[in-house]
Image (spheres, rainbow, N blue to C red):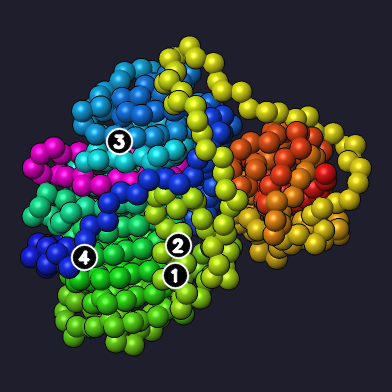
Amino acid sequence: MGRRSPSTRLQAALAALAVAAATGVILTIPEASAAVAAGATGYASQNGGTTGGAGGQTVRATTGTQIHAALCGRASSSTPITIQVEGTINHANTAKVSGTSCNTAAGVIELKQISNVTLVGVGAGAVFDQVGIHIRESSNIIIQNVTVKNVKKSGSPTSNGGDAIGMESDVRNVWVDHSTLEASGGESEGFDGLFDMKDNTQYVTLSYSVLRNSGRGGLVGSSETELSNGFITYHHNLYENIDSRAPLLRGGTAHMYDNHYRQLNESGINSRAGAHAKVENNYFEDSKDVLGTFYTDAAGYWQVAGNVFDNVTWSPKGTDYNPAGPNPTSNATVSVPYAYTLDSASCVPDVVARTAGAGKGLLVSDGSCTPQSPSPTPTATASPTPTPTATASPTPTPTATATTAPPSGTNLSIGAGSDGSSKADGTSYGNVRDGNLSTYWSPAGTTGSVSVKWGSPTTISSVRVREAAGAGTVTGWRLLNGDTGAVLATGGAAGTATFPATALSKVTFEITGATGTPRVAEFETYA
């Protein structure tokens, strides 16, 4: 087990570093659409992908009880649902709700024995105050744009074993994105981990998030013999004023890239018990022993490249303490199965400061140290939609019938830019806008997304997606306004879709189903 983090060290650091107040969300969206980013990254994009509640009902909730009621009101425990959360969720408004499609508990947001759920903060922001989020025996979960703070395992009130977000017992495919997880002390003050995974949890990504002011950042595996967890990606996150476990890895494989670690007081990435960590293009600052095997003689492994160590101190090696520094070198080779784009470590503090955490408008990096800035989104003036009952009908989503008839006019994709959620080896996002049917983009799996974007708002009213022959074909898709997240159209087979003329800077073709790995040769856009 890890050494207990001294509360005096953490409290001294807290005195020097003011705890930031939970910020309000600056992104607002139309009532009928969810502000969910185009697609999961990292390991959450593998094993069939992570799509959350895509394609299902969208509802609003302003209390924890309403979140539970939305889960319990579904037709089944796997019926897709997106729950838009606004307001403060606390013990007073989080009660157990019963139903055949849920298994909830009071005082904690319980995502237990369910699948296909998105929980996203909207409007003025979603703050889970002393109420943790517990994911258990569940799969295909997205948590986005929320703040979870001051969750305790001792004292009063307690929730979720003291974890801000905790996962355990056969959990698969979870994507936590643009969220803020914070405490106000260490174990002696009643807090535990901010982001914990145990008991066979796999295929998880934590991206563009802030973890701060805690004795423990998070763990993967609850003991040296509990080695069933792994395939975790951490990218573009800020770890700030954390004593240790940033994270602690017991077995499994993890990938850390483009993270900013600042004020790790005792130790940082703790790879042990045979764990393998790929650590690249991170920025470590004002910290101690940021990588190694700590508090055990059960060795772990790492591959390092492109990292910056700015005012990092290193302790001497001991029988149960093996820092990777002062000149970290690789002691293993760690490969990952997905494509990704690295920002230079030198710009990571700036990029992460502008993109990570709740209330940042879901900004992401484009790999060139420049966050992608969506156009201003309309302010929602309607009051929150009441939580539906079990008999409520789903919120309608615009649909379009794909045809083979091509639109007329100029293909506006030629000369535009592009990006996406992932890409298979040997393919490029740019291949969908080069006018060449012999080149193509494929996702790293059966689902994923590709976008066409312009430097200024461009009006389009139809798209044509043309596939190349390959291992699979598209069987389900959504067309999204990349500026607002609004759904423009949905369909089955790829082809032509028309919709009301819309001015936007980015349009996204999201593949939600396919037979094998699809190949998109051209993503054409027309006015």
Asked if the residues shown at circle 3 and circle 4 are in contact, with their CB atoms under 8 angstroms apart, the answer is no
Q: Earlier in the sequence, mark 1 or mark 4?
A: 4
For residue 17, the mark is 4
- Marks 2 and 4, how far apart at CA: 19 Å
- Marks 3 and 4, how far apart at CA: 24 Å
- Tell me the residue that label 2 is attached to: 354
Residue closest to the eye, 466 or 508? 508
- Tell me the residue that label 1 is attached to: 350
- Marks 1 and 3, how far apart at CA: 29 Å
Q: Amino acid at mark 4?
A: Leu
Q: Amino acid at mark 3?
A: Thr
Q: Earlier in the sequence, mark 3 or mark 4?
A: 4
Q: Earlier in the sequence, mark 2 or mark 4?
A: 4
Q: Is residue 153 magenta?
A: yes
Q: Residue at x 66, y 64 (%)?
A: 425
- Marks 2 and 3, how far apart at CA: 24 Å
Q: Is residue 182 left or right of residue 68?
A: left
- Tell me the residue that label 3 is attached to: 88
Disc 2 element: helix
Q: Quadrant of residue 298?
A: bottom left
Location of residue 397 with respect to 467 vertically, above or below: above
